Image (cartoon, rainbow, N blue to C red):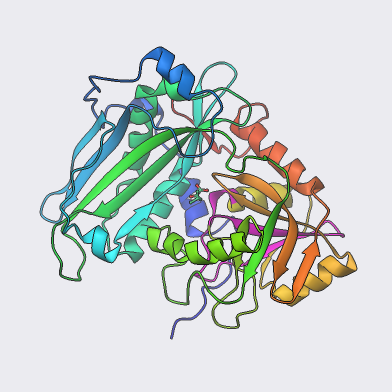
Amino acid sequence: MHDAVAPQSPLETPLAKAAAVPLPGADELADRFPLEANPRPASPERRAELLRGLHFGTVFTDHMAHARWSRSEGWQQHGIVPFAELSLSPAAAVLHYGQEVFEGIKAYRHADGSIWTFRPRYNAARLNASAARLAMPALPEEDFVASLVDLVRTEAAWVPSGEGESLYLRPFAFASEAFLGVQSANVIDYYVIASPTGAYFPNGLKPISIWVSQDYHRAGRGGTGFAKTGGNYAASLLPQQQAAERGCDQVCFLDDVTQSNLEELGGMNLMVVYADGSVSTPKLTGTILEGSTRSAILRLLADEGRAVREETIPLVTLLEGINSGAVTEVFACGTAAVVVPLGRLAGEGFDVEITGSEASRHIYDQLTSIQYGKAEDPYGWMYRLA
Ligand code: COI
């Protein structure tokens, strides 16, 4: 039996608390990952060409951060190394049993040329929470941040400056030991790759359509739903295909126990906006990823005086609310996509339109203004990398 995790205020979750612990400045963390320079980096002309017309996750920079853990020696071999294909034994445990965790975090260029990131300790703590569930070692939080500092300082020229653009950082760790026994690996490799990125959805804030999967679930109680691990995303691919076959952009998952309550989109959390100005989001039950964007948005909404609830949201209640006008807007949020309004919600036996997108636009502007240094950061969320 696995009990649902008790709901907590977004301000008090272990991840939010970890994120609030001050970090040493980037100069102090720098050089923990010494540079082995790429002998053949992209030329400035090629880089400029690659930085034109950016999409999500297709272009990669010249270097990556790396460290290796072994059970006998702990973390070692820290470095910034040339971005290159990996050499991996076909028997590497990750290829067979999926022992892997990852993160997503962005570096933003501000108008004065400085480069910043958003709540890096949140991602450091979440990587370790995911790693613990996957029986993998923790990476010291300061080393996680140091890997971002050294990589971004090396790749500063790759941080784009266009509207809504950023350098998307993808830290990940996996079982690289060549061993086919089903057990926690004795060797783990940690990498951070960097990808200059534009909008996740090519149409920006244009509302997306959602297919609610009633056949498949993303995660089950006691499983790995709260962890950022590849298997959760693999499980979402077939239902995502079904959503696309039905003309929808993304799939939404329901809980596996009652098969009736909203969970998340697989790569994004959900928020429901009501006519009375209040906002609710599915509570953290252990099957939902605790998004850093979700956490920040809850804080921003609460601080502008809205009632904010983390609660069970039955699909039927949402549909009734949309039909009656009690629900004015639904939006999804995540690091990659930031905020995107839902324009249509469909599933077996229903297909409804949602017209509002005012709150989504407002919260998008508020959050991105902080991230891009255009508004004050009263929460100390931003961390200067370079
Ligand atoms: C993110 O928003 O950073 C994610 O990890 C979601 C998706 C791109 C996997």
In the picture, measured across the screen, residue 340 lies left or right of residue 354, that is left
Q: Locate residue 87, reporting x and y percent.
A: 18, 44
Whether residue 286 appears in magenta in the rendering, the answer is: yes
| Residue extending farthest front | 245
Q: Locate residue 347, reporting x and y percent.
A: 69, 71
Q: Where, quadrant-wise, is the N terminus in this rendering?
A: bottom left
Q: Quadrant of residue 97?
A: bottom left
Q: Identify which residue is drawn at 43% across, 57% down.
A: 228
Q: Locate residue 274, reporting x and y percent.
A: 82, 61
Residue 260 in view (yes/no): yes
In the picture, measured across the screen, residue 198 lies left or right of residue 128, that is right
The front one of 30 and 209 is 209
Q: Quadrant of residue 169?
A: top left
Which stretch did the figure color magenta? 267-293
Q: Identify which residue is drawn at 62% across, 31% down.
A: 164
The front one of 24 and 89 is 89
